[in-house]
Image: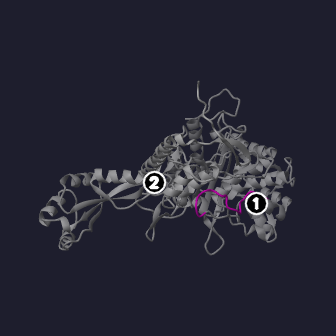
């Protein structure tokens, strides 16, 4: 007959639950004790493996690497990478860390300085007098002879195994793409003994790119395997304690960036400007796929200037302001699409006279289409007067022409609108056609994106994702949706005016495309003097547009702004920037295989 073991039960209460716990009999205790020892050893072993492989893995890898290379690791440099993103999702590494080698003389181990110097000179060039001075310091274990040698030279010295000659490895920031988008990537420099981001993405995301603290092994282990918090609390604790450097995945498209930079170089070389610059952005997402200047620099060498003109400079950008004024007047019902006036070629405001660029009038019944196509200053004055100063200023503010866009780059400034906010009639009149109001180029791009985005502004951004690796998941960078400044109908009305400018005007009709509509406006503004007033012979030329202009929501679309400062040999931007703009339009249509927005069977005249 089977013997039944008696099991006594007692009640247990935990977090509101009641259940029975079996009471262990004496003869079961040895087994349970052995099992407990085994479980404890397993936990200790798992903890030790975790510490060695995860927490201390990087340090052990560095030690092994140093032993293999025959060098000493002189610093613990940790900084995340920066990547640009190709259209297919592949990436280009544009900022990373690279080993470099220093030659160290250890006199404690050097027995024959003459022989060492002879063999050393076969591999590297050095100052013999300095070597002799170092060699004369007896029992000195550390003197730097050369701060940086090539990998090939390091391999040769390693093979020679010269007594008293050691290689120390350090890491420096390295930029594989050299000068590509240097104004966006930025660089690092030392602040005291600490290496920090100084410019561009390197500065804006400095706390993410560099390791902010030391690993706390105990805290990590407790976060993973202990504590009383829930999963969310543990994940937060892990992220805080790991202090892992992050890598940035940027929206800049390398091929587009390279093409755009070359176009700007061509423009600036031909017209001998101070510099040329431009932005290409997706108006729906706010992704900046190119931010280029003609005078960028090699990040591995000469960091000759510290400005990103596109976000740090306030500029009177001229007539590309006019479509925004028209849209504001239509949206506020200050005028209607039936607006017309008698254009005499000039308008008098108090003691001032505002002229059209050619000082000619277009006569009675001059329409909004003519005002925009022929860029008539007189028409803009009539429209701004109809709006009134308060309403005009309200739209300047709503369009963000006096506020930072929030782009994820350092040193962004806000546009200068002090003149127009005096509410003087001439100041408002000038601002309506882009003089006396000085937004940043990125502010103007954001404002124009409302036309392509059904009246909505989007925050421009350069980084989409931050990747930490190891225990911390990648994070998408949150982007804020801004105010809807125009209705979709107003945006579409202005878009039609701007596409007609390309399709119907003598200047731009040869650039019209059969399958893709392009909305554009050119601008020319006098440059201001430092002492006040304007130059008569120095100008800024600007050119802005978007395409396919009638793309449906969700379809791929791009907006381009480019400008040149103080060009020579041409009076208007329709001469200096037209080819560069439309060349870039055609390139992007082909490169991205953009969906046509016109139902025509004829092929584009895209080369």
Magenta region includes residue 278: no
In this picture, residue 416 sits left or right of residue 607: right
Question: x, y percentage for residue 118?
Answer: 14, 61
Q: Earlier in the sequence, mark 2 or mark 1?
A: 2
In which image quadrant can residue 121 be found? Answer: bottom left
Point out the stretch of residues depicted in magenta. Answer: 395-411
> What residue is disc 2 on?
179
Question: Extreme bottom residue here?
Answer: 531
Q: Quadrant of the C terminus?
A: top right
Question: x, y percentage for residue 231?
Answer: 63, 48
Residue placed at 17% from the left, 61% from the top? 163
Check disc 2 and report its element: helix, strand or loop.
loop
Inspect this view and state whether residue 345 appears: no
In this picture, residue 365 sits left or right of residue 142: right
Magenta span: predominant SS is loop
- Which residue is nearer to you in this view: 382 or 293? 293
- On screen, 497 above or below 393? above
Check disc 1 and report its element: helix, strand or loop.
helix
Question: Extreme front residue here?
Answer: 1
- Give the CA distance from mark 2 to mark 1: 36 Å
> What residue is disc 1 on?
396
In this picture, residue 82 sits left or right of residue 344: left
| Label annotation for residue 163 | none
- Which residue is nearer to you in this view: 238 or 11? 11
Colouring scheme applied when the structure was drawn: one colour
Q: Quadrant of the N terminus?
A: top right
- On screen, 422 above or below 523? below
């Amino acid at each position: 007959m089977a013997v039944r073991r008696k099991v006594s039960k007692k009640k247990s209460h935990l977090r509101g639950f009641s259940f029975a716990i079996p009471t262990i009999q004496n003869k079961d205790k040895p087994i349970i004790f052995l099992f407990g020892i085994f479980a404890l050893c397993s936990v200790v072993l798992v903890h030790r493996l975790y510490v060695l492989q995860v927490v201390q893995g990087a340090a052990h890898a560095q030690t092994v690497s140093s032993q293999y290379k025959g060098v000493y690791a002189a610093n613990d440099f940790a900084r995340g990478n920066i990547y640009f993103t190709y259209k297919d999702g592949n990436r280009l590494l544009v900022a990373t860390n690279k080993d470099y080698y220093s030659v160290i003389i250890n006199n404690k181990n050097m027995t024959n300085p003459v022989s060492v110097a002879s063999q050393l000179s076969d591999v590297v060039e050095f100052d013999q007098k300095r070597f002799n001075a170092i060699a004369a310091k007896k029992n000195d274990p550390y003197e730097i002879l050369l701060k940086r040698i090539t990998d090939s030279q390091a391999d040769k010295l390693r093979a020679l195994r010269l007594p008293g000659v050691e290689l120390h490895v350090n890491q420096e920031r390295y930029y594989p793409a050299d000068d590509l988008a240097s104004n966006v990537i930025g660089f690092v420099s030392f602040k005291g003994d600490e290496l920090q981001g100084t410019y561009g993405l390197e500065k804006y995301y400095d706390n993410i790119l560099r390791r902010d603290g030391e690993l706390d092994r105990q805290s990590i282990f407790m976060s993973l395997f202990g504590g009383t918090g829930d999963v969310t609390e543990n994940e937060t604790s892990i992220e805080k304690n790991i202090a892992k450097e992050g890598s940035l995945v940027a929206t800049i498209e390398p091929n587009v960036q390279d093409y755009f930079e070359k176009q700007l170089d061509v423009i600036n070389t031909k017209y001998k400007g101070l510099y040329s610059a431009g932005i290409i952005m997706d108006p729906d997402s706010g992704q900046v796929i190119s931010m280029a200047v003609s005078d960028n620099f090699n990040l591995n060498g000469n960091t000759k200037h510290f400005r990103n003109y596109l976000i740090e400079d306030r500029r009177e950008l001229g007539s590309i302001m006019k479509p925004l004024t028209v849209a504001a007047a239509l949206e506020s019902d200050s005028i209607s699409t039936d607006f017309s006036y008698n254009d005499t070629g000039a308008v008098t405001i108090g003691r001032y006279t505002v002229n059209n660029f050619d000082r000619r009038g277009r006569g009675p019944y001059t329409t909004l289409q003519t005002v925009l196509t022929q860029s008539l200053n007189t028409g803009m004055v009539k429209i701004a007067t109809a709006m009134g100063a308060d309403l005009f200023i309200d739209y300047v503010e709503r369009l963000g022409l006096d506020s930072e866009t929030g782009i994820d780059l350092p040193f962004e400034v806000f546009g200068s609108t002090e003149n127009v906010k005096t509410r003087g009639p001439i100041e408002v009149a000038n601002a309506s056609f882009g003089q006396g109001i000085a937004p940043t180029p990125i502010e103007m791009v954001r404002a124009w994106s409302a036309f392509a985005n059904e009246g909505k502004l989007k925050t421009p951004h350069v980084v989409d994702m931050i990747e930490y690796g190891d225990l911390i998941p990648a994070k998408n960078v949150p982007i804020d949706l801004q105010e809807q400044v125009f209705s979709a109908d107003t945006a579409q009305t202005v878009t039609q005016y701007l596409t007609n400018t390309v399709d119907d005007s003598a200047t731009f009709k040869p650039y019209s495309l059969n399958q893709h509509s392009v909305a554009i406006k050119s601008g020319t503004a006098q440059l201001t003097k430092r002492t006040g007033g304007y130059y008569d012979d120095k100008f800024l030329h600007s050119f802005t547009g978007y395409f396919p202009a009638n793309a449906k929501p969700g379809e791929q679309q791009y907006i381009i702004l480019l400008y040149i400062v103080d060009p020579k040999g041409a009076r208007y931007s329709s001469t200096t920037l037209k080819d560069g703009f439309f060349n870039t339009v055609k390139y992007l249509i082909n490169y991205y295989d953009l969906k046509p927005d016109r139902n025509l069977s004829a092929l584009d005249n895209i080369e």
